[in-house]
Image (tube, rainbow, N blue to C red):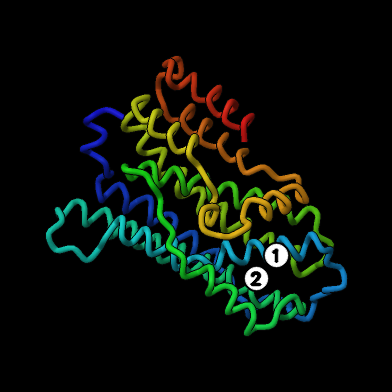
Amino acid sequence: MTETTVLDDLLPALEMHELVDQAVTRAGERSWTLAELDWDSLRPERLTEADRSAVQFITYVEDHIPGYLSHFLEAFPVAEAEQELERFGFNREYFRFLVAWAGDEERHASALARYQVETGMATREGLLAALAEEGRKKFALPYEHPVQSFTYTLIQEKATQLFYQRFRETVSEPFLKNLLGRLARDEARHFAFYSNLVGAYVTRDGASSVPGLKEVIATFRMPLADTMKGYWRWSLKVADAQSYDHTEAYDAVVRLVQGFVDTPGEPSVADLGSFVQAIRRIK
């Protein structure tokens, strides 16, 4: 990134307000509750061992929402009186999105946890203890610039959306199929917000934003990858069962840059697609 980009690391608060307004309005229009789910339609006998393993795995990921939220509230504080008004304004707008997003993710975690209990996959007491063991571990992102954190989350939301869609295609248990569709739609909304947000940065900074985005792609690891014991073996087993590869989400970054940068012939922009393909080959 250029020195200008480093110093001017946040969008104007008004621009952020417009992006958040759109996302929060959409979230309110498309919200759902656990009470409206047809729990009587559960058919646990139709679950395969692969289905059960995947549900257990994604419950851990979704249930870590306190850790994810804590990280972003620390990175974009709204309780520091000494920060510049414009910076606070940006953080305050982002807080509005974070609250709505956290509500979605908490609902996901609650639905998956109840599903495990209702289908006999776990006892409530045992599940709560297991989730607490992982949930108390700290989540953090290593990136210096806000747009890199937003790009990480863009990729993560797209990857999760893709996984839920693939998982839904293989499941025969009717309740879980319906639930996975709801989860995928929520993740698609989250991805749309981050796509618009990162797109605003790329529009502003042009090709100079590409090196920072490449760094995120090169270092990307899904949440809990560095904290959960046995994560890699379990995640690969789950991914293989669904014919899923999280690196497919990297293509969303390429399309975004190509769509927002006015100079597609710029070498760094043209190189991004090749860079992503090279990263995917070694994953």
Q: Which mark is residue 112?
A: 2
Along the line of sight, which residue is nearer the eye, 11 or 121?
121
Q: State the SS at label 2.
A: helix
Do residues under tags 2 and 1 come within 8 Å of each other at their CB atoms? yes
On the rendered image, what quadrant is the C terminus found in?
top right
Residue 224, above or below 115: above
The amino acid type, in three-letter code, at marker 2 is: Leu
Q: Position of residue 38 (x, y in %)?
A: 73, 77
Residue 171 spot, x, y in % from top left:
80, 59
Above or below 183: residue 9 = above
Q: Label 2, label 1: how many angstroms apart (C-alpha)?
A: 7 Å
Number of marks drawn: 2
The spot of residue 265 in percent (x, y) is: 45, 14
Residue at 72% across / 53% down in the picture? 238
- 121 left or right, relative to 262: right
Picture quarter containing residue 278? top right
Amino acid type at mark 1: Val
- Give the residue at mark 1: 55
